């Protein structure tokens, strides 16, 4: 135990030297002063600076995160005490967050394996569940009226760096059986929140369920994100034993102890080369670029020129406007396709799913109202209520493709009214009141009421949807399977031509 404490003190001195470095013009000494001025307790350190200054400590931090973070936090407190002793006395501990390049430790929830246990990793994903913020006791102070003595007790658990987990029993009596009164004003608590991030839908392999990982946030990291946000979280990957008291099956639960949370841009970062830019500028000079792009959309489907042009506008999107009086004018375009079976409605939806950088598929029969918007669920371990994002919240700034829209129940359809008009989801249930962004375009496909479109009835009788829902679709297309030998001949020629096509790279 003494050797471990001495080891931590040795590396603590190295971290103090890193913070108080005059060779780098005192970069982090300035950051520490800014941290004190902002009344913050967390210093963000770029891991690249540590690699350049002290490669050994950087390697140790990535592979042995617990001891290194403990030493770095103590070094920060020691350095703060030299800069501002009064501020160091006000706060018992300080924290260090990390950013920069993590190499092969920059992972997704799917690639987090047991090989990363104990390491510091950087995980990217989308927030799906967020718990409520709870106070977590760090130190409790108790007063005994009978003996007039004051006792103090500290608490640690498996998520702490400093010591082994303490007993979870909260003292109510002393050793002699005298009742104890808790002095809440002298006790110390910290904010505690758990959240779950899931790998981004566009990065999940086709046909596989997206993976997720649980995150533990403490102190100033709580309430930094909400369901639907795309985040980059740096933390220590650890495992926790099961709560079966005395025995274990050998299977452990894994968590990520966060030390830095960064919100990612809502726009997808596309890899655009110089050749792509030259080609885009060349195409932009064409006067018929709109027709050219619409013909390039789903080229395996014959016809449907106006439908393809509408879907092209949906993919490009409009311009969102915020008026000076606070009114928001949405820039998302919603399109509804209604028509006979076998007119390529589902194929158009599938093409959008493969083309749009951020698209979420769903079906009318397999989706509920809360599954599309947001749901309040109960955590199986803690029993607390938590908010879980639905498909439209996950597709913020993207496209939601809803197939078999007519098969959805009326109650579930009314849940998306607010999303399509206001671009947000408002939740007020189970004591949780929240507003989540769901600024997405909706592309829906449905069949007429009678299976096929009856031309002897009015369009409203064929469509069978509520006026309040139809008014939220900007474009509505009726796709008919017209019985015409010439059109059928053109479609069959197009299908045969598509099957006869061979990639020039294929060998004979």
Image: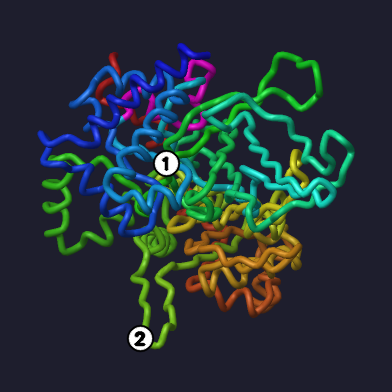
Residue 66 in the image: state x and y as whole percent: 47, 25
Q: Determine which quarter of the picture holds residue 20.
A: top left
Residue at (38%, 36%) from the top-left corner?
A: 497
Q: Nearer the viewer, residue 389 or 447?
A: 389
Q: Residue furthest top?
A: 3
Secondary-structure class at tag 2? loop
| Horizontal arrangement in the rendering, residue 467 relative to residue 54 (left or right) | right
Q: Earlier in the sequence, mark 1 or mark 2?
A: 1
Please state the horizontal and vertical placement of residue 141, each as a whole percent of the image: 68, 47
Q: Is residue 474 above or below residue 339?
A: below
Task: Give the number of the mark in front: 1 or 2.
Answer: 1
Label 2 belongs to which residue?
324
Q: Residue at x 77, y 49 (%)?
A: 148
In the depicted view, which residue is nearer to us: 436 or 408? 436
Q: Which residues are magenta?
A: 102-116
Report if residue 494 lies within the magenta region.
no
Residue 309 image-quadrant placement: bottom left
Evaluate whether residue 219 shows in this view.
Answer: yes
**Could you say which disc has been placed on residue 95 in the image?**
1
The x and y percentages for residue 157 are 64, 32
Dot 1: few (<14), some (14–19), or many (≥20) neighbours within 10 Å?
A: many
Residue 459 circle label: none
- Number of dots carrying numbers: 2
Instruction: Give the residue drawn at x 40%, y 88%.
Output: 325
Work out whether residue 169 or residue 310 is closer to the camera in this orientation and state it. Answer: 169
- Majority secondary structure in the magenta region: helix
Relative depth, front residue between 147 and 396? 147
């Amino acid at each position: 135990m003494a050797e471990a404490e001495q080891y931590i003190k040795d590396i603590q001195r190295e971290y103090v030297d890193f913070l108080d470095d005059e060779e780098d013009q005192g970069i982090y000494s300035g950051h520490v002063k800014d941290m004190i001025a902002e009344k913050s307790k967390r210093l963000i350190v770029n891991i690249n600076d540590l690699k350049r200054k002290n490669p050994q400590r950087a390697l140790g931090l990535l592979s042995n995160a617990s001891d290194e973070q403990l030493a770095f936090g103590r070094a920060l407190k020691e350095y703060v005490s030299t800069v501002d002793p009064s501020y160091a006395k006000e706060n018992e501990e300080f924290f260090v967050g990390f950013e920069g390049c993590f190499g092969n430790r920059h992972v997704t929830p799917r690639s987090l394996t047991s090989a990363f246990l104990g390491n510091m990793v950087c995980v990217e994903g989308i927030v799906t569940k967020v718990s409520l913020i709870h106070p977590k006791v760090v130190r409790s102070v108790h007063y005994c009226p009978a003996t007039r003595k004051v006792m103090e007790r500290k608490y640690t658990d498996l998520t702490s760096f400093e010591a082994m987990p303490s007993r979870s029993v909260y003292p109510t009596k002393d050793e002699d059986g005298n009742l104890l009164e808790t002095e809440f004003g002298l006790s110390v608590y910290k904010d505690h929140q758990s959240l779950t991030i899931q790998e981004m839908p566009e990065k999940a392999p086709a046909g596989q369920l997206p993976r997720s990982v649980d995150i533990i946030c403490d102190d100033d990291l709580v309430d930094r994100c909400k369901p639907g946000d795309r985040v980059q979280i740096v933390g220590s990957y650890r495992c926790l034993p099961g709560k079966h008291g005395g025995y274990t099956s050998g299977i452990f639960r894994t968590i990520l102890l966060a030390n830095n949370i960064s919100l990612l841009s809502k726009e997808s970062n596309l890899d655009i080369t110089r050749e792509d830019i030259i080609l885009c500028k060349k195409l932009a000079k064409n006067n018929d670029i709109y027709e050219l792009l619409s013909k390039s959309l789903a080229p395996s489907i014959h016809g449907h020129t106006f439908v393809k042009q509408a879907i092209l506008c949906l993919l490009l999107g409009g311009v969102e406007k915020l008026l000076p009086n606070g009114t928001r004018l949405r820039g998302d375009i919603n399109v509804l396709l209604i028509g006979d079976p076998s007119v390529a409605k589902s194929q158009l939806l599938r093409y959008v799913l493969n083309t749009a950088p951020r698209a979420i598929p769903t079906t009318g029969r397999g989706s509920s109202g809360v599954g599309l918007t947001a749901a309040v669920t109960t955590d199986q371990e803690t029993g607390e209520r938590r908010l879980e994002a639905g498909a439209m919240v996950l597709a913020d700034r993207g496209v939601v493709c809803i197939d078999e829209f007519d098969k959805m129940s009326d109650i579930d359809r009314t849940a998306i009214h607010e999303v399509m008009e206001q671009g947000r989801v408002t939740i007020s249930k189970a004591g949780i009141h929240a507003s989540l962004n769901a600024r997405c375009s909706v592309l829906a496909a449905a069949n007429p009421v009678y299976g096929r479109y009856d031309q002897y009835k009015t369009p409203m009788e064929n469509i069978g949807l509520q006026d309040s829902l139809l008014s939220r679709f900007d474009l509505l297309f009726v796709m008919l399977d017209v019985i015409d030998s010439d059109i059928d001949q053109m479609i069959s020629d197009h299908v045969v031509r598509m099957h006869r096509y061979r990639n020039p790279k294929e060998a004979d």
